[in-house]
Each structure stands twice: as C-alpha cells, then as structure tokens.
C-alpha cells in the first residue's frame, strides 16, 4: 500500500511538472507575442542568416491535444520558407490526415499572409514542399508490408541479399527519405509509436507546446539541431 502511494505521489509530481512546463511556455509565448506578431518571411530570413544547415526533411510530431489550427500550420510554413523540401506531420491517431483539407486551407491562408509584401518570396501561395501525413499505423503496416514482400522475393529467388537499402525500397512512407530532424511538441517523453525504421539517425528537438509558437522558437530549434554532433552512428 505504501509502495502504491509512493508511485502515485511520483506520478502526480511528474504530471504537475509537465503541466507547469506547458503553462509557463504558453505564458512566455504570449508575453512575447507582440514582438513577433508582425514578422513576415523577410524578417524570418534575416534572422536565419547564421542559422547553419537547414535539414531537408523535418518531421513535426504533435503529441498534445487542442492545438489551434493557426498554430499548427505555422511551423509548416516556416519550414517551407527556409527551403525544407519534405515535411512529415505525425500524430498517433491520424487525426491530421483526416483533417487534411482543413489543414491545407489554413496553410495556404497563413502562407499568403506571411509572404504578403515580401521582397524575396514568390506570391500566390506557392507551397513548394512535399507534405506527408503519418500515424502509428504507418510504422507497423510499413514494416510488415516490407518484410512480407522481401520474404516473398527471397523465396522466389528475386532478392539475393537483404540490406538496409532493400528494406527501404519497400517502405511506403519513408522510402529513402528519412527525416533529419524531428520537432516534437508536447511533454510526453516518447515518440508515441512514430515509425521506428527512419529515425535511427534523426536528431530530436522537443518543445513543451505548439500553442502560440513563435518564429524564434522555431529558429532556436534549428540552431539546436546544428549544435548536435552528428556522428552517423559512429
């Protein structure tokens, strides 16, 4: 009984700590909102001059409930403006995929607003990026599909050798296109079922919340990514 009570106290402490993280980050974002509310793509690019290498594929992982659509699409647009060519959006239940039409509409509206009066960015909502929607089902189903296909071809003599490239050839979502950086939103210290195969060399950056996210939060995340020593498994 005492042991269960101790575990309950630990759980309550950790839960309260995580909630305070979200509240403090949201409050901080709100306090500086007035400073960044007038940002557009030109200001973003000016602040990104010494940013370093921008990852070609960024995966945005949303592990919190109730994120407003206008906050959800902001990091997508900022990725596009910085030249990220592939953006994958992950949530456990696949709700983002189910709201794809609404997300696309909000995305184009914010992109048009963010690039309005820009001297360096094309007008007209030119969203030059490959956007993928990913859920927990993609991880299990993709690996099972790849394993079955490879096994079938091995039995028929079509695949003489199994390598990492062989497996990636049969992955539907992340075929030779693994994310270089994951930006995770939420206090859960886990990727919550994110497809495991493509993240063996991925750098993971965490933010407590996506609520009222600012461009400076996003740029700071890219800077953290570039400060991490990339040893490529060595």
Image: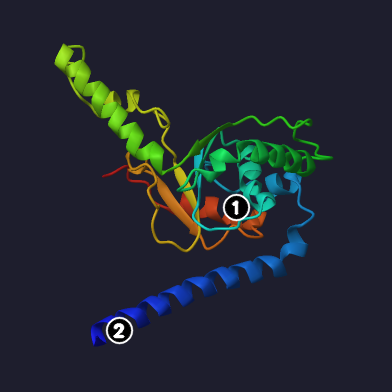
- Residue 219's disc is 1
The quarter of the picture where residue 109 lies is top right
**Residue at the far bottom in the pictured view:** 2
Q: Which residue is mark 2?
A: 6
Q: Secondary structure at mark 2?
A: helix
Look at 84% across and 40% down and name the residue there.
117
Q: Nearer the viewer, residue 129 or 49?
A: 129
Horizontally, residue 1 falls left or right of residue 50, namely: left
**Residue at the far front in the pictured view:** 1
Decide which of tag 2 and tag 1 comes sooner along the chain. 2
Q: Is residue 56 visible?
A: no
Look at 15% across and 16% down and name the residue there.
155
Residue 182's x, y, as percent? 46, 47
The quarter of the picture where residue 95 lies is top right
Horizontally, residue 3 falls left or right of residue 192, namely: left
Seen in the picture, residue 160 relative to 90 is either above or below; the reply is above
Look at 54% across and 54% down and name the residue there.
221
**Residue at the far right in the pictured view:** 117
Look at 65% across and 70% down and name the residue there.
28
Q: CA distance from mark 2 to mark 1?
A: 41 Å
Horizontally, residue 124 falls left or right of residue 53, namely: right
Residue 13's x, y, as percent? 42, 79
Q: Quadrant of the C terminus?
A: top left
């Amino acid at each position: 009984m005492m042991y269960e009570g101790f575990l309950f106290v630990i759980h309550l402490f950790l839960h309260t700590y995580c909630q305070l993280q979200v509240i403090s980050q949201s409050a901080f974002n709100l306090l500086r909102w007035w400073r960044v509310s007038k940002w557009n793509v030109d200001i973003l690019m000016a602040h990104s001059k010494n940013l370093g290498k921008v990852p070609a594929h960024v995966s945005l992982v949303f592990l919190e409930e109730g994120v407003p659509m206008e906050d959800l699409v902001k990091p997508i647009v900022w990725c596009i403006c910085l030249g990220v060519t592939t953006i994958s959006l992950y949530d456990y239940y696949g709700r983002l995929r189910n709201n794809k039409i609404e997300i696309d509409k909000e995305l184009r509206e914010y992109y048009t607003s963010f690039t309005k009066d820009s001297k360096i960015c094309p007008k007209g909502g030119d969203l030059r990026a490959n956007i993928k929607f990913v859920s927990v089902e993609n991880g299990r189903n993709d690996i099972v599909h790849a394993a079955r296909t490879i096994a079938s071809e091995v039995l028929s003599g079509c695949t003489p050798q199994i390598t990492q490239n062989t497996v990636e050839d049969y992955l539907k979502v992340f075929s030779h296109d693994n994310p270089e950086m994951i930006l995770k939103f939420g206090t859960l210290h886990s990727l919550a079922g994110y497809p495991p195969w493509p993240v063996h060399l991925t750098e993971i950056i965490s933010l407590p919340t996506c609520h009222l996210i600012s461009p400076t939060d996003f740029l700071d995340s890219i800077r953290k990514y570039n400060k991490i020593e990339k040893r490529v498994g060595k």
